[in-house]
Image: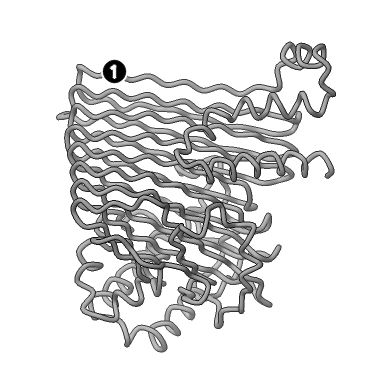
Amino acid sequence: MATQQLTSLENYAASFESLEKDGSPTQPSWVRELRRSAFARFNELGFPTARRGNEEWKYTDIRPLARRAFRPATQTNAVDPSQLAPYMPGSEQWRLAVFVDGRFDPQLSNLGSLPSGVSIESIASALSGDGAAVEEHLSRHLAYDDNAFVALNTAFLQDGAFIRLDDGAMVEEPIHLLFVTTGHNEEIDVYPRVLIVAGRDASASIVESHVGLSDGVYLSNAVTEIVVGAGASLRYYKMQRQSDKAYHVTNTEAALSRDSYFSSVNVDLGGGLVRNNLNARMKEEGASTVLNGLYMATKTQHVDNQVIIEHIKGNTTANELYKGILDGKSRSVFHGSIIVREDAKGVNAYQVDKNLLLSEEAEAYTKPAFWVYTDDVRCGHGAACGQIDDEAMFYLRSRGMDETTARNFVIHGFVAEVIDSINQDQLRDHVSGLVHSKLEEWLTE
């Protein structure tokens, strides 16, 4: 990918050299080699700042990010459990793993007793042993060859979450991974890493949250790799409530085996500049996926969702629905690609992106696309952008609702389809409450 560097990479080179000196010697040799290879590739790629010939980043300008001199946090700040209460959607029965400024915090976590065949640990802890279980999958599914942010995350790999479900293992209550960024005197970067491996016929629900406890400027560059074994069922929810000045970039890859099921609901309610790359690879027949998303942006916030579903084998299904609510001078970008390979006959795939614009200055760019290299498939897509329906408002006002109540009723109705797809009562109520609170907050600004 063509790039145009606006600043030197000396800042990242110095940070990497410091990490090599202070943290690398305790890691297995294969991790050190992986990190060095990834940083070398990042140096070659640079950030994708070019404004021409750069289709993947056409509507998202990251030159402001590239100009900043982010540095890894030299220490983690103490976090009181009460500070995390607003970010806890579940009960005490949920398994909880908390990471503060990129580091696992056992005092804030609550893993409790786990069902047979289920393990949850920090990547740092897993690597302190032989690391064989991590080595088998880490950086094997989401390559950094052509992605600068994945390369940078891999180069600065230190800690993260590793969840392993053996064949037939089941977890009834959700597992919550909470990544917290605290306030610092300098602009820091954090590199959350998640590896989830679900064996044959395993089942679990996993919530991955990214939140900021300060209103400062920082970079959160997260990578998640998910392996869904044959016949396994994995429900995955990602929540983002970063500082409104933060840069938040995520890359998520899900690899689906025969007859497996993977669902994802991505919720963005914060961040100054947000970019989510979500890839689902249907590697074997019978696999199915449902990818839904909800994003809310106001002022000058920018949210970019790039969703790719690749049907490598036939008789696979995919359904995708993203909805956005935009106010102020905010901007959203959605690019959804469904790729059907030559050997993938019998595919059934559909995608939709809809945006509700609450102001005259909000903008939404939506680009659904199909790449079909075979026949005997059923594929469709749709996209829409518009404002609140005047007829719906008139109807509700004529039934006695005041303007604010009627407006919020219409907005909640618009996103209800995504919220209702959350197959967990407490989390669904939590998200619905956050949407309501966000709308109330916008009215007072």
* Viewer-closest of 56 and 316: 316
Q: Nearer the viewer, residue 194 or 297?
A: 194
Give coordinates of residue 351: x percent, y percent. 42, 26
Q: Residue at x 49, y 43 (%)?
A: 266
Point out residue 436 in the picture as x, y percentages from the top left corner: 70, 39
For disc 1, the neighbor class at 10 Å (few under 14, some 14 to 19, many from 20) is: few
251 to the left or right of 434: left
Q: Is residue 103 left or right of residue 68?
A: left
Horizontal side of 402 relative to 2 (left or right) equals: right
Display coloring: one colour
- Measured as percent of width and height from the top left, residue 399 is found at 80, 13
Query: Number of labelled discs?
Result: 1
| Image position of 106 with respect to 285: above or below | below
Q: Secondary structure at mark 1?
A: strand
Q: Residue at x 67, y 46 (%)?
A: 301
Residue found 63% across the figure and 59% down from its top: 246
Q: Of all residues shown, which one is farthest toward the left?
A: 343
Three-letter amino acid code of the residue under disc 1? Arg
Residue 333, how many percent across, how many down? 55, 37
Residue 403 in the figure: left or right of residue 100: right
Q: Nearer the viewer, residue 218 or 199?
A: 199
Q: What residue is drawn where x is 69% and y is 22%?
A: 387
Q: Is residue 9 above or below residue 354?
A: below
Considering the image in quadrants, where does the C terminus appear? top right
Residue 187: image quadrant is bottom right
Q: Which residue is mark 1?
A: 378
